[in-house]
Image (spheres, helix red, strand yellow):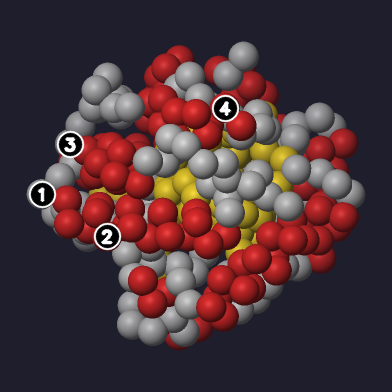
Amino acid sequence: MSRPGPFSQRVHGLPRLGLGVSTEYGAGSQAGALDPRALHRLGHAAFLEVGVEVAKGLDEQARAWAAAGLPTTYHFLDVNLDEPDDLDDGWLGQVRAASRVLAPAWLCGDAGLWHVGPRDRGHMLLLPPVLTGDHAEQMAAGIMALRERVGLEVLPENPPGAFFLGDLDLLGFFARLTEAADTGMVLDCAHLAMYQRWAGREPTDGLDGFPLDRVVELHVAGGTEQDHHGFGFVHDDHGGVVLPDTWAIVERVVAGAVNLKAIVVECERNDVATVVPLFERTAELWS
């Protein structure tokens, strides 16, 4: 449970989970998909980050992991933190029910737009936040409300995107968001690399002034460079090839993130042979 007091004190009560792997409903049932328990038996997955959309619930793979008493985190896939109506009693009840099964160390998820209009299966998508101070304040209010109502830390994550709107840069937005909500965050290194490329920056630009003590969890994921009629972008495919820009960000952040508790290698639709080298490289950087 989240303890009272400022984040600088609360963070010390969070467990150090180590290196983990992600999943979401049905991911493990696809041909060639990762078996997290097999990876765990090889010593490469200390915890499971479970992506949850409450309309789908928890699949058997997630339930089996939790039933074995293995650590988890809860990654929401269906809440706009800037919309108070999203924290309705029905949704919160289902979050609490899933949390009773998973016993997650914390809640986390992309601080973007998971749906447009009412939450509905036909409206689900993921867009980055509008990078303004007002939007940061609105999201901060949602984070604090969710933290209070569920009793767990809520760590916002920087979402992926091929285009961004607003007068703040991405790192400035998340610095403002985490301060306003007095929270830690998940820094997705692949998503940040996508933004830096879009903005015409070097991968680690802006990190020197960023509050890395707010980073509790990192994500490492593969991506594929693509081009559409001259518009270059990176597809966040969670594949087996992690781009050099992403590795550069990982190396820089782990050197300064004094409160880093967990790194998730997002690779749920790859076989074990593809995944193991990613874990070995990540472990070398976070030693």
Q: Which residue is mark 2?
A: 138
- Which of the two labelled residues, at mark 2 and mark 1, occupies the earlier sequence position? 2
- Disc 1 from disc 4: Cα separation: 34 Å
Mark 1: which amino acid?
Asp
Proximity of marks 1 and 4: CB atoms separated by less than 8 Å: no
Q: Which residue is mark 1?
A: 167
Q: Position of residue 139 (x, y in %)?
A: 32, 57
- Disc 4 from disc 3: Cα separation: 36 Å
Q: Which residue is mark 3?
A: 200
Mark 4: which amino acid?
His
Foreground: disc 1 or disc 4: 4
Q: Which residue is mark 4?
A: 12
- Disc 2 from disc 1: Cα separation: 16 Å
- Which of the two labelled residues, at mark 1 and mark 3, occupies the earlier sequence position? 1
Asked if residue 31 is positioned above or below residue 238 in the image, the reply reads: below
Foreground: disc 4 or disc 3: 4
Q: Residues within 10 Å of mark 4 (few under 14, many from 20)?
A: few
Closer to the camera in the image, 178 or 114:
178
Mark 2: which amino acid?
Gln
Foreground: disc 2 or disc 1: 2
Closer to the camera in the image, 88 or 131:
88
Q: What residue lies at 25% left-to-right and 52% top-to-bottom?
A: 136
Q: Position of residue 81 (x, y in %)?
A: 38, 62
On residue 29, which mark appears?
Answer: none
Proximity of marks 4 and 2: CB atoms separated by less than 8 Å: no
- Which of the two labelled residues, at mark 4 and mark 2, occupies the earlier sequence position? 4
Q: Is residue 8 visible in this depiction of the protein?
A: yes
